[in-house]
Each structure stands twice: as structure tokens, then as C-alpha cells.
């Protein structure tokens, strides 16, 4: 399906979020000690080792995703070196937000590993969501390692190149000092063993002048044409143009839908849009709750920043109705259950981790958008 007008607005917000979380792995952390050659909006700069100002390989639809991935593989290698995680260690500071539409659910870690001699990834058991997302230079997900799992990968498992990106997400139990300390210990508990540690070097130098315009064009197209669940793949056989190109350029590093699914929730009438007291009632999504799957909803202002508090609820702290349904209140009276404060012209992102199936979560999204609108109270 393509996006109708309402979904297009939602898509613009969602793809911006995915860009911020996936294609800006240096944002939100300390400034890199070296120039990685990645611009503020993700464009390639001459300092990036995967690109050439002149004489580089022309970038087309056939290799644009690979060029985007080479950009970030090279940037992370410059910043961190081979076979080493770079962890974000703290939650997001509401007074100093640096990533638009930030994800307050999970804390990120990044690494580029040499897989030519094989690697083994072990994530110890945990009762919260914790995963290591492994993908190659074609942005094909080759593994997602969850708590209690050990996964071995070999050179033959990647669809291109000899290196993989490890994008780790760790859920803190709470955002206070105790919760963040536990989260840091979780990050450090992951063990990755590799037989080789050659630094990543792109096999080709890509042409900046053909890459940046095509990249911008694809991101713009993704706003109105993108179908997110069709863009992120775990097999090269599932690549379908142009969804593969649009979605991976707009949200590089995103998880396939069977691991995580996102959609935007918008106010359903003018009064709700103008921050009048409003509410929405819905059933909980069909997720693998027994594997620490969960849903959350985070509210942002029209520019994508958190400006109210409380601004966030999830399935771990929400109070259900007697029939099991969920009612969220927006700008409710003092003491209102499941209350979230919203500004004028707000938007929210619904995140669903570990859906039971892609089909069920897509159906859930479509039903929510069509039939469960946030409406002002009469």
C-alpha cells in the first residue's frame, strides 16, 4: 500500500525519527575526536574515507544503499576502530536533547566488526529487552541476538563485504541512577569474539556529487511513497526496489518489522490538536510479551522535541481498563490515569517491539490509525 494524506504526514514524522535514530549514530553522544565525514543531515562529506570528491564510483539505485552503509561503517571505524563497541551510557537529557524524536525506550551502542574469520555474539539472559542487531554493507539484517542467545556468524553469511555493523539496543529498568547503572552493566556484559580485527575499508570510493542528491531525493520520496515494513529486510532475496532504497536511506539501521514496528499517532480533531483534554482507547498490540516485547507511546512537539512531562507511557507502567483495553489521557485533570501532557500541534510515536507477526502488527497499525483517534472530550 502507499500512503494517503494522513499517513503521509505520519510517514514524514516516522521517517524523520528513524533517520535520527538510525542514520545519526554520533548524535546524542560526545563529539567525535575526528572528522568522520558525515554531515549534520547525514550527507557525505569529503573527509569520509568511503567517498571521493572526484573520480569516485557513480552512485545509482543499484548501489546507493551500499554507499550509505559504507559511509557509516567508515565513520564508526574512524571514531571507534575495529571490533569495539561505542556505548551511549546515559538516558536522554530533556534539557539538552540532541536527537530529534528521540527514543526514550532504549540506549544505543555501535560497532563495526570484521567477520572474515567469523564472530560469536553472546547476550546474557535478561528480563528486559536487549538485542544486538547485525547487518552487512547491503543493509541486510543477518542476525538479531536476544538475551540468552549465542549466535555464530561467518563470512559466508554476509551478502557483501567482510564487515558487519553491530547496533545494540538496551532497555533500562528505570531512568534514575540505579536503572542506568544496571543498564551500563548490561551493555558491558555482551561478549563478541572475532578471529580477525582488520579495520573496515570500503572496497570502492563513491562519488559524492551523485550520492548526496540521490540520497536527498529518496528520503523525500519515502515521506509519501514509503512502506516501512517492506524496506528493512533479512534476506537479499527480499529486496524490492524502490522501497529498499527509500526506507534504508530515510532510516538506515532500522530493524525489520518482525523485530520492531513503528507508527505515528496524531490528534484526531482540532481541539485535540490544540491541546484540549482528550483521550484514546485501544486494545494492546499482539506482541511477544513473554520475551520482553512491549509497546510505548512518546509525545513530541511539532518540531519533534519533547517539551512536556509526563510525555511517555509504555506497557510496563500503563494501567489497563477492567476489560483489558487501554485508555490514554492527554492533558487530563489532576490524578487522571495514564495521563500524558501534550503541547499544541503535538504528534506521538507508537513503538511496538517483538510483534507476534508482521501481518498482525501491520493490521493493528491500520486499524489504530483508522478507528482509534485521539479525540477531545465533549
Image (cartoon, rainbow, N blue to C red):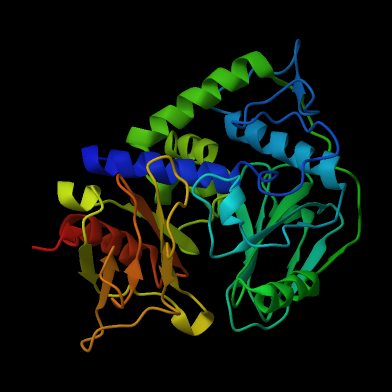
Percent coordinates x, y for residue 332 in the rendering:
26, 68
- Could one spot residue 267 in this view of the protein? yes
The residue at the point 77 percent across, 38 percent down is 75
Question: 251 left or right of 192?
Answer: left
- Could one spot residue 140 in this view of the protein? no
In this rendered view, identify the residue nearer to me: 61 or 303: 303
Q: Residue furthest left?
A: 378
Q: Residue furthest front?
A: 334
The residue at the point 40 percent across, 73 percent down is 356
Q: Residue furthest top?
A: 54
**Which quadrant is home to the C terminus?**
bottom left
Q: Quadrant of residue 360?
A: bottom left
Percent coordinates x, y for residue 43 in the rendering:
63, 27
The residue at the point 48 percent across, 62 percent down is 260
Percent coordinates x, y for residue 10 in the rendering:
33, 45
Q: Quadrant of residue 1?
A: top left
Q: Quadrant of residue 172?
A: bottom right
In this rendered view, identify the residue nearer to me: 310 or 228: 310
Question: 190 left or right of 342?
Answer: right
Question: 71 left or right of 301?
Answer: right
- How many numbered tags mark residues here? 0
Percent coordinates x, y for residue 28 in the rendering:
66, 48
In this rendered view, identify the residue nearer to me: 317 or 95: 95
Looking at the image, residue 103 lies above or below residue 46:
below
Amino acid at each position: 500500500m502507499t500512503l494517503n494524506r494522513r499517513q503521509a504526514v505520519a510517514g514524514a514524522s516516522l521517517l524523520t525519527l528513524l533517520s535520527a535514530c538510525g542514520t545519526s549514530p554520533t548524535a546524542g553522544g560526545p563529539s567525535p575526536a575526528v572528522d568522520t565525514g558525515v554531515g549534520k543531515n547525514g550527507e557525505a562529506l569529503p573527509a569520509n574515507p568511503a567517498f571521493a570528491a572526484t573520480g569516485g564510483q557513480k552512485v545509482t539505485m543499484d548501489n546507493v544503499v551500499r554507499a550509505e552503509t559504507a559511509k557509516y561503517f567508515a565513520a564508526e571505524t574512524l571514531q571507534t576502530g575495529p571490533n569495539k563497541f561505542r556505548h551511549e551510557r546515559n538516558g536522554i537529557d530533556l534539557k539538552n536533547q540532541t536527537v530529534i524524536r528521540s527514543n526514550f525506550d532504549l540506549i544505543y551502542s555501535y560497532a563495526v566488526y570484521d567477520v572474515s574469520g567469523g564472530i560469536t555474539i553472546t547476550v546474557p539472559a535478561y528480563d528486559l529487552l536487549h538485542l544486538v542487531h547485525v547487518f552487512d554493507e547491503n543493509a541486510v539484517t543477518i542476525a538479531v541476538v536476544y538475551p540468552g542467545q549465542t549466535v555464530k556468524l561467518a563470512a559466508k553469511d554476509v551478502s557483501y563485504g567482510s564487515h558487519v555493523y553491530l547496533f545494540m539496543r538496551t532497555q533500562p529498568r528505570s531512568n534514575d541512577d540505579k536503572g542506568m547503572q544496571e543498564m551500563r552493566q548490561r551493555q558491558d556484559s555482551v561478549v563478541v569474539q572475532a578471529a580477525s580485527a582488520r579495520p573496515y575499508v570500503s572496497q570502492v570510493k563513491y562519488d559524492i556529487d551523485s550520492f548526496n542528491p540521490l540520497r536527498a531525493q529518496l528520503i523525500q520520496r519515502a515521506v509519501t511513497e514509503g512502506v516501512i515494513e517492506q524496506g528493512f529486510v533479512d534476506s537479499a532475496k527480499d529486496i524490492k526496489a524502490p522501497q529498499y532504497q527509500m526506507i534504508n536511506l530515510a532510516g538506515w539501521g532500522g530493524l525489520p518489522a518482525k523485530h520492531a514496528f513503528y507508527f505515528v499517532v496524531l490528534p484526531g480533531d482540532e481541539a485535540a490538536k490544540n491541546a484540549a483534554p482528550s483521550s484514546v482507547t485501544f486494545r494492546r498490540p499482539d506482541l511477544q510479551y513473554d520475551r520482553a516485547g512491549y509497546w510505548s507511546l512518546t509525545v513530541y512537539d511539532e518540531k519533534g522535541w519533547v517539551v512536556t512531562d509526563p510525555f511517555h507511557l509504555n506497557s510496563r507502567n500503563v494501567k489497563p481498563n477492567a476489560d483489558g483495553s487501554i485508555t490514554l489521557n492527554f492533558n487530563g485533570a489532576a490524578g487522571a490515569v495514564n495521563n500524558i501532557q501534550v503541547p499544541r500541534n503535538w504528534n506521538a510515536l507508537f513503538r511496538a517491539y517483538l510483534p507476534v507477526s508482521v501481518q498482525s502488527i501491520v493490521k493493528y497499525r491500520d486499524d489504530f490509525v483508522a478507528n482509534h483517534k485521539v479525540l477531545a472530550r465533549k
